[in-house]
Image: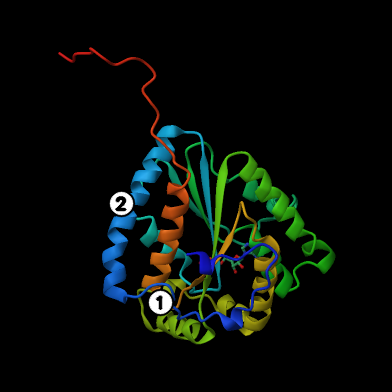
Amino acid sequence: MKRYRVKPDSKVDLGKIDPGSTKGFKGGKEDAEQLFHPLNQRLLAIQESLWAEHKRKVLVVLQGMDTSGKDGTISHVFQGVNPLGVRALAFKAPSPEELSHDFLWRIHAKVPGAGEMVIFNRSHYEDVLPVRVLELAPPEIWRPRFDQINDFERLLAETGTTVLKFFLHISKDEQKKRLQDRLDDPAKRWKFRTGDLKDRAHWDDYMEAYEDLLQRTSQKHAPWYVVPANKKWFRNLLVATVLVETLESLGIERPEPEEDLKGIEIE
Ligand code: ADP
């Protein structure tokens, strides 16, 4: 788990991190699937305690190129959780109203409340990704955002939110396969957008923008994990492991009943 965490201020060379890697795990797909079920059960138990305790909050941020598996991670890793306490949401290109505010305005409105677990499919990090790569705003606008993001996430952490951020790292070849698959499979065609090809054409610029944000915004209280994501089973196993281990270490307990229940008999 630790080997995939980005240390604060450390330089990341994505070219040196193999998206097909399964380092740290000895087994293969079948072993991973067997391990996954008990991990999932542990996640359900933690989420129930989080909801029952109604104090702490959990924010999970998923970023990655198109087809990197953000949707798949959400549906797989969070299967079975109680929808009362869990929300997943996707951030699209900002609306005119959103653009008329600061870039964190729409984000802050969606962070988890007490007892909640919220998963962001894309996030405020888009504001230093397409905005930078596609030059939607000049450097004077996006450059200060690294510090602004760090301040914002520190505020969340200091007010009881555990923030975990995952970059789903796929190779350009793997994206080609997955995009082709979307084109070829009628059931998946709805997911295909020609705009994805524009981002693909800027692949190297995106990798550079990711390297920069990983270095500048991985904080002790809001770490980034680079998840090798060419193999879906490994991606799911790693994300689930980080979540479960981190959240279990918080020691969230179900609260004691408010009154003394001794001696109560139900007729
Ligand atoms: P997804 O690819 O996540 O399944 P879409 O195809 O609707 O969903 O893509 C959402 C698009 O919105 C992406 O191209 C993403 O880069 C863009 N987007 C999200 N947030 C921002 C932002 N703050 N500024 C510019 N573009 C953004």
At mark 1, the secondary structure is loop
Question: What residue do we see at 65% from left, 57% from top?
Answer: 219
Residue 123, image x, y percentages: 60, 58
- Looking at the rendering, which quadrant does residue 99 occupy? bottom right
User: Ligand 1 appears in which quadrant?
Assistant: bottom right
**Is label 1 within 8 A of ligand 1 (CB to nearest ligand atom)?**
no
What is the distance, in whole Å, between disc 2 and disc 1 at their CAs? 22 Å
Query: Closer to the N terminus: mark 2 or mark 1?
Result: 2
Residue 8, image x, y percentages: 67, 62
Q: How crowded is the residue under tag 1: few (<14 C-alpha within 10 Å), some, or many (20+)?
A: some
Front residue of 4 and 132: 4
Q: Which residue is mark 1?
A: 231
Image quarter (top left, top right, bottom left or bottom right) of the C terminus: top left
Q: Which mark is residue 71?
A: none
Residue 102 in the figure: left or right of residue 162 = right
Question: What residue do we see at 29% from left, 56% from top?
Answer: 38
Residue 201, image x, y percentages: 63, 84
Amino acid of disc 1 = Lys
At mark 2, the secondary structure is helix
Question: What residue do we see at 75% from left, 51% from top?
Answer: 102
Question: What residue do we see at 68% from left, 67% from top?
Answer: 215
Front residue of 89 and 151: 151
Q: Which residue is mark 2?
A: 41
- Looking at the rendering, which quadrant does residue 147 occupy? bottom right
Front residue of 42 and 64: 42
Q: Is residue 139 above or below residue 38?
A: below
Q: Is residue 221 above or below residue 226?
A: above
Residue 105 in the figure: left or right of residue 231 = right
Q: Residue furthest right?
A: 140
